[in-house]
Each structure stands twice: as structure tokens, then as C-alpha cells.
Amino acid sequence: MVKRLRTHIEDIQMTDIVDIYLETGDFHEAVKQSGLPTHIAHLKLIKSGCLKIQDKIQYGSRTAKLGGMAEELFQKYVPEATDANKYFKKNNPVYDFWFDGLTIDVKYSSLHKKKNGNSQHWQFRTNGSQDFIVAFLERESGLELDRPNILLIPMQFIEAKKELHISQSGPWFQDFKVEPEELQPLLKDYVQLRKDGLF
């Protein structure tokens, strides 16, 4: 009995949940085939960076859900972008989307209010080697992704920062805020600059 159990555990360890998930494209099916407990499978898939947007929304923490919903919103505004987690190989935590040669990481931040005053800000991580960060910022507390503010930030402007703190009156917000309908045309302009060797 102990030997059989040990063999079963070794079989589970040999089964790569990430490979199964990439083959099936279905979270439930991958968990079933792998024999792993759901939460272990979920943790492994989050770490690998290959969870599809829908799976992030359905199975992640609230933060992961909002991040996944921000990615969905980006896909809506830039339909020609390719979801890197869905179509490219596993272990691609560097960026979320590929757009004709450009790499884009999508971020979400809720609105943070200081306890001792009226000042408000957003914050998100900026590490990675992507070309752009597209940040969806909660417009007002509780609105989440209902008409969020959107920033399109070329990574060339970010110097060795691990996290950006953004206020509504600050230069990041004033200089990089875009409307949803501007996202794809602006990215296309950058694609052309890249093709011309200027970016």
C-alpha cells in the first residue's frame, strides 16, 4: 500500500501541469489529467505565467481577477494584439501581449487614499523587459474597471524603478494618459517607428 502510494506521488510529480494545460487549454481538464490538487495546480500555473485571461478571472484572487479583466479590456481596445499567455510557450511572465513586434505588459491599480488626508494615488510594478506598460487605473474608489483611466507608458521613460506611484496631478498621469480608442493607433505608430529602426 505504501509503495503504491509512493509510486502514485512520483507519477503526479512527473506529470507537468503546465504542459497539460497548454495542450488542453482548459484549467479543469488539466487539473483532472494531472491528478494534482486544484490549489497546487493553480499555484504552478500562476508561477508559470501561462494562465489564460478567463482562467485568471474565474479562479484567481480579487487582484488576479482585476488584472485578468484589465487584460480583457486591453484586448477589446487592441483586438489585433496577441495574448502572449495563450499563444506563446510557457514561462512567459515578462509581458502579456505581443503587437506586431512590440511587447506590452498590462497592469491594473485600484485607487489608494492616504488615511491622513485627501491625497490619492495609484501604484503598480514596472519591472520587466517589455516595450510598454498599459496601466488601467481605477477612476474612483469602488468603480474598479468601470471607465478606468488608461496610461500608455514606453519603458524607455522608466529608469530602474520597481514600482511607480502616480498621482492625478503628476507628470506620469498628465503626460501618458490616453483614451481607449487611441491605444491601437498609437501602438501602430510605434510599430512603424520600430520597422524604421527609430524605436
Image (cartoon, helix red, strand yellow):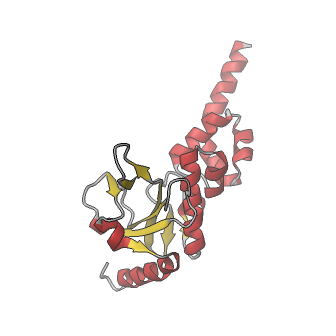
Q: Position of residue 86 (x, y in %)?
A: 60, 60
Q: Position of residue 113 (x, y in %)?
A: 40, 49
The residue sitting at 53% across, 47% down in the picture is 63
Q: Position of residue 192 (x, y in %)?
A: 40, 85
Q: Residue furthest left?
A: 159
> Front-most of 14 and 150?
150
Q: Is residue 173 above or below residue 165?
A: below
Q: Is residue 153 left or right of residue 52?
A: left
Q: Is residue 21 left or right of residue 184?
A: right
> Front-most of 76 and 92?
76
Image quarter of residue 131: bottom left
Q: Can you see residue 74?
A: yes
Q: Is residue 153 left or right of residue 77?
A: left
- In the rendered image, the quadrant that contains the N terminus is top right
Q: Residue furthest top?
A: 2
- In the rendered image, the quadrant that contains the C terminus is bottom left
Q: Is residue 169 above or below residue 33?
A: below
The residue sitting at 49% across, 73% down in the picture is 99
Q: Position of residue 58 (x, y in %)?
A: 67, 49
The residue sitting at 63% across, 35% down in the picture is 39
Q: Can you see residue 88?
A: no
Image quarter of residue 2: top right
> Front-most of 13 and 145?
145
Q: How many marks?
A: 0
